[in-house]
Amino acid sequence: MDDKQLLRYSRQIMLPEIDVLGQEKINSSHVAIIGLGGLGCPVAMYLAASGVGQLTLVDDDLVELSNLQRQIAHTEDSIGDAKVDAARRTLQGINSQTTVTTVQVRVDSIELENLLTDVEVLVDATDNFEVRFAINEMSRKFNLPLVSGAAIRMEGQVMVLDPRKAESPCYRCLYPTPSTEPQNCAENGVFAPLVGVIGALQALETLKVICELSHDSIGWVHYFDAKRMEWRKLRLKRNPSCPECGKS
């Protein structure tokens, strides 16, 4: 790192858990964020600000007026633009040294497989079980850590899944089949700051994975009740009958 970078990331480098070595890992890392909505926006912004070297942003949607209540990487001037393009402009304004690649597609397993070259961490910031299952499948196929988040109404959850660890569960250990209940904000509503809380935690856990500090988070589901301001931490064990990792 040069002097300018040392100054820029000095508050992070001061942390003994990070130090110069950790910051160099962050600067050379490549993270793929699937979904640039309420969760993906704060994830992307914090990762860029923290110095992640390359971000691949994946989303097929366009910015709408109703998104602006919570999707903080997008602005009124972004309405009608692709979310990945609007987010890229914001990230470039935050950190011009972060390389941002945009992919405007609705991903499935085939699409994801083509996107994961050199990616070190997958971030699931989507609200669709079909896509979540595809992300989980690719996490296991390519041995990539997965940081999953969800937020709806006034409740959210975060979990870290790492197929490199033999004891780690996968997403389908928690949700073996798709829920029959609507799982998106359009049908259920969502409290604006909630997605910021969950998205920021996803960014935090992603950086911990990059810096190899994530071992205490793997296999736990963190639930947040914003209405009651309560956290619950539940152990998620690997399920021998899981339709994804149980067959391994």
Image (cartoon, rainbow, N blue to C red):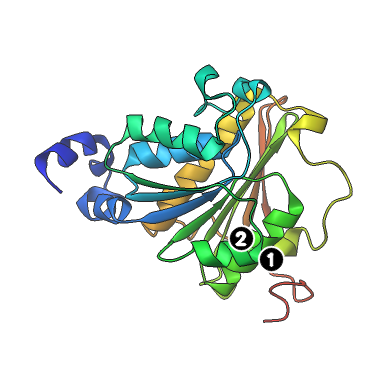
Residue at (79, 75) in percent of width and height: 241
- Residue 154 rendering spot, x and y as whole percentages: 72, 29
Q: Is residue 169 visible?
A: no
| Residue 73 visible at all | yes
Amino acid carrying label 2: it is Gly
| Along the line of sight, the residue nearer the viewer: 156 or 102 | 102
Q: Position of residue 10 (x, y in %)?
A: 21, 37
Residue closer to the observer: 57 or 203: 57
Q: Position of residue 217 (x, y in %)?
A: 54, 55
Q: Earlier in the sequence, mark 1 or mark 2?
A: 2
Instruction: Determine crowd level at label 2: few under 14, some 14-19, many 20+ residues with C-alpha closer than 10 A.
Output: many
| Label 1 crowd (10 A; few <14 / some 14-19 / many >=20) | some
- Residue sitting farthest toward the top: 76
Q: Residue at x 67, y 62 (%)?
A: 134
Which quarter of the image is occupied by the C terminus? Answer: bottom right
From the viewer's perspective, is 98 left or right of 117? left
Instruction: Say which amino acid is labelled 1.
Output: Lys
Q: Is residue 166 above or below residue 136?
A: below
Q: Residue furthest bottom?
A: 248
Position of 77 compared to 100: left or right?
right
Residue at screen point 60% across, 33% down: 38
Indicate whether 178 appears above or below 190: below
Query: Which of the two residues, 108 or 49, is positioned nearer the viewer here?
Result: 108
Compared with 162, 16 (above or below) is above
Using the image, tell me which numbered label, if any, was put on residue 237.
Answer: 1
Q: What is the number of the mark on residue 219?
A: 2
Kind of element beneath mark 2? loop
The answer to whether the residue labelled 1 contacts the one labelled 2, judged by CB atoms less than 8 Å apart, is yes
